Amino acid sequence: MLSCNFNPWQGLVPRVAPELHWHVLWTICQPSVREVVEKADCVLCLGAVLTEMETGGYTAKLEPKNLISLTAKVQSIGYHSYERTDLCAIINELLVRVKSGQLGGKSFNVPVIEPEKFQRSENSDALSVADMIESLNSMLSDKYSVISDVGDCLYASLSLKTNIFLAPGYYSSMGFGMPAAIGAAVADPSRRPLVLVGDGGFSDDGNGNIHCRKMGLRPIVIVFNNASYAMLRFVDQPAAITN
């Protein structure tokens, strides 16, 4: 089984076998990962609503005939859709079939995908996002939980190698990072929160640091300061939103 997470579902499936687990976001993911998924003869989407976010701005080239999409409201198999079915019952039946031995003798070659390479800054004195992601990956372990706000920090966080990942859905929850970090720390005190947040999101709820101090929590907070609401500028380019 190959596992490919859609944004923002990273962390949903533990990375127990990294060679079988990738993150796919089409236009901004590794081209080799995108190629494997799009050429697959069967793509099973569990709980993923294929919106603009999950499909990288609708750049995904998924053949409907090869797609099985299962959500809580509707299940689609190829060109056929079924409503008011029990998603849990379907998943349980899939598990029964997988364990029944009916797939005995069937195998496939696991694609070999080179590790993701980051474009490092040419200025040795500058700190780039790539530098930071590589440094964070070198330290991440089961001692940390990763939380991301929306915007550039969310897309950068998709390259982090973690089993515990919390992020808001879509674009509507700016300021999620710090409150989520408090919740994560309270829920699992054994893990220290690592928070990635933009300057816009931090200006909304950065005062969560005050509560962390009161509660004895020690999150690591990394602020992406691009001096703008970059997501709004991307979505509404003519407005030239910078601050």
Image (tube, rainbow, N blue to C red):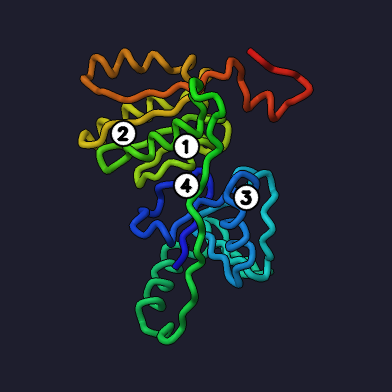
Image coordinates of residue 59 in percent, x first then y, are 70, 50
Q: Earlier in the sequence, mark 1 or mark 3?
A: 3
Q: Which quadrant does the N terminus fall into?
A: bottom left
Residue found at the far right of this picture: 238
Local SS, label 4: loop
Q: Is residue 82 visible?
A: no
Residue at (21, 33) in percent of width and height: 189
Res. 105 image quadrant: bottom left
Q: Earlier in the sequence, mark 4 or mark 2?
A: 4
For label 2, the residue is 184
Residue at (69, 58) in percent of width and height: 61
Image coordinates of residue 23 in percent, x first then y, are 50, 51
For label 1, the residue is 157
Of residue 77 and residue 119, the one placed in the foreground of this image is 119
Image coordinates of residue 80 in percent, x first then y, are 66, 69
Of residue 70 and residue 24, the one placed in the foreground of this image is 24
Q: Which quadrant does the C terminus fall into?
A: top right
Q: Mark 3–mark 2 contact, CB under 8 Å? A: no
| Disc 1/disc 2 C-alpha distance (Å) | 17 Å
Local SS, label 3: helix
In the displayed structure, does residue 193 sit left or right of residue 30?
A: left
From the image, state whether disc 4 or disc 3 is nearer to you. 3
Which labelled disc corresponds to residue 26? 3
| Disc 4/disc 3 C-alpha distance (Å) | 14 Å
Amino acid found under the numbered disc labelled 4: Trp
Local SS, label 2: helix
Q: Alpha-carbon neighbours of circle 4 within 10 Å: few (<14), some, or many (≥20)?
A: some
Q: Alpha-carbon neighbours of circle 1 within 10 Å: few (<14), some, or many (≥20)?
A: many
| Disc 4/disc 2 C-alpha distance (Å) | 16 Å
From the image, state whether disc 1 or disc 4 is nearer to you. 1
Q: Alpha-carbon neighbours of circle 3 within 10 Å: few (<14), some, or many (≥20)?
A: many
Amino acid found under the numbered disc labelled 1: Ser
